[in-house]
Image (tube, rainbow, N blue to C red):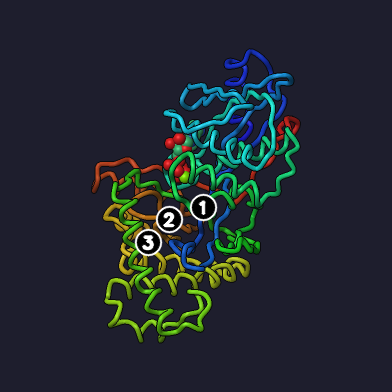
């Protein structure tokens, strides 16, 4: 599949620039096994890079001041002068790249001329972080071909900054971190505040992670997200007022939360209890994965879905239906909504021999109920952004 994508991107490069590319880079999308909405509450997340990529075909152009992109998936080009300051533009996809350039420029580094064609197997806007792959892929390329000496952490932060400043999305750091730091067969337990992280072996042993894309995205995503943050802040304020000695939100326990329950009200209470439980589940899931205790991992995923649906209330009819029906299938150990909520994909832990049947059944039921064709992505946990040498696929 990578070979196909690289060949396709090479063709795109040839047709856009009438020459041969010198380098190839692959920037992966990501999944998050568990740890939803805890990134802004001192929690850990458990993402991993996957085998879906944006492929970049690249040529450094000496004595040039121009950086030119060809976005094959839109059949659109964009150029800018690398010696001038850039501002956001109308072409949305170009902003993710201009934002990276801007962050690199602000850090005092200089780049030269370059031509880049890119194309992707990461679905856009489905919650697999095609945007992080785009930003961090470009940051990685600049670092490599212009010898900028940026660390992997800096590359992830540049990607996040680009998204904040040029794309206008106030995202956390998980997506960029996973795309840069991913490792084959490993999940990353990441503290989003400190960026401390630890790898855990993903022993799935006869099971796979399969994503079902509901193809719905309810528009209240942003307002829903802000409301949840307000509910959580309300609870946190009361907790810290009562227990000022506690350092991090994750160090509060359930009985402390119970003590402020009447004061904060049921809504805030539900949001906070979800977060405390979810933070605990991430550590348990990392351990379960590395010990190959897949059944327990499945239970944790199910608990998370239940929490997201009834306590944090960020699921929706389509995803609840999908998850509920998936759990009735043979060989399914866990299913949950993945990502911020109100649509997107479910992530499902299914025994290999039962995958095809589960996909068939859920597709039919989902179509019958909502009139929508769901999409399916079978994913493997893979390496983070890397240069791809052409001889890798000469067999
Ligand atoms: P997600 O990151 O979950 O896929 P986002 O809405 O954050 O969704 O990012 C999607 C946006 O990223 C697209 O609308 C587009 O602007 C940009 N993008 C992603 N992949 C590509 C691609 N292959 N070609 C051009 N732009 C892309
Ligand atoms: Mg994104």
Mark 2 or mark 3, whichever is nearer to me: 2
Disc 3 CB within 8 Å of nearest ligand 1 atom: no
Question: Is disc 1 in contact with disc 2, using a CB cutoff of under 8 Å?
Answer: yes
Q: Which residue is mark 1?
A: 31
Mark 3 or mark 1, whichever is nearer to me: 1
Please tell me whether residue 369 is drawn above or below residue 105 in the rendered image. below
Alpha-carbon distance for marks 1 and 2?
Answer: 8 Å
Alpha-carbon distance for marks 2 and 3?
Answer: 15 Å
| Near-viewer residue (317 or 324) | 317
Q: Which residue is mark 2?
A: 338
How many residues crowd mark 1 within 10 Å: few (<14), some (14–19), many (20+)?
many
Which label was assigned to residue 327? 3
Alpha-carbon distance for marks 3 and 1?
Answer: 20 Å
Disc 1 CB within 8 Å of nearest ligand 1 atom: no
For the point 58% across and 43% down, the residue is 28
Q: Position of residue 388 (x, y in %)?
A: 70, 35
How many residues crowd mark 2 within 10 Å: few (<14), some (14–19), many (20+)?
many
Asked if residue 110 lies left or right of residue 210, the reply is right
């Amino acid at each position: 599949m990578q070979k196909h994508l690289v060949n396709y991107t090479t063709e795109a490069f040839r047709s856009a620039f009438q020459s041969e590319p010198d380098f190839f880079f692959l920037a992966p999308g990501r999944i998050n096994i568990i740890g939803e909405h805890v990134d802004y509450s001192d929690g850990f997340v458990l993402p991993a890079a996957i085998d879906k990529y944006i492929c970049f075909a690249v040529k450094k152009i000496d004595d040039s001041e121009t950086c030119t992109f060809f976005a094959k998936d839109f059949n659109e080009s964009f150029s800018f002068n690398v010696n001038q300051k850039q501002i956001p533009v109308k072409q949305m996809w170009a902003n993710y790249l201009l934002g990276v350039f801007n962050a690199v420029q602000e850090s005092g580094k200089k780049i030269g001329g370059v031509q880049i064609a890119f194309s992707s197997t990461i679905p856009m806007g489905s919650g697999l972080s095609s945007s992080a792959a785009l930003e961090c892929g470009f940051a990685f390329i600049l670092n490599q071909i212009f010898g900028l000496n940026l660390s992997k952490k800096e590359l992830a932060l540049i990607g996040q900054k680009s998204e904040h400043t040029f794309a206008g999305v106030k995202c956390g750091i998980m997506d960029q971190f996973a795309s840069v730091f991913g490792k084959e067969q490993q999940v990353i337990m990441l503290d989003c505040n400190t960026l401390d992280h630890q790898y855990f072996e993903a022993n799935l042993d006869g099971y796979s992670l399969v994503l079902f894309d509901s193809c719905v995205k309810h528009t209240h995503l942003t307002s829903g997200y802000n409301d949840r943050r307000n509910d959580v802040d309300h609870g946190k304020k009361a907790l810290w007022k009562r227990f000022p000695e506690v350092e991090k939100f994750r160090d509060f326990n359930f009985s402390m939360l119970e003590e402020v329950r009447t004061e904060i009200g049921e809504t805030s209470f539900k949001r906070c209890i979800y977060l405390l439980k979810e933070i605990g589940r991430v550590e348990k899931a990392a351990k379960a994965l590395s010990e190959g205790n897949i059944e327990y991992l499945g239970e944790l995923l199910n608990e998370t879905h239940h929490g997201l649906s009834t306590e944090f209330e960020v699921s929706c009819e389509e995803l609840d239906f999908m998850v509920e029906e998936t759990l009735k299938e043979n060989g399914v150990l866990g299913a949950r909504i993945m990502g911020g909520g109100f649509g997107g994909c479910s992530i499902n832990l299914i025994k290999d021999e039962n995958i095809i049947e589960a996909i068939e059944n859920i597709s039919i039921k989902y179509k019958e109920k909502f009139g929508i064709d769901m999409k399916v992505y079978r994913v493997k946990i893979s390496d983070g952004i890397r240069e791809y040498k052409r001889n890798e696929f000469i067999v």
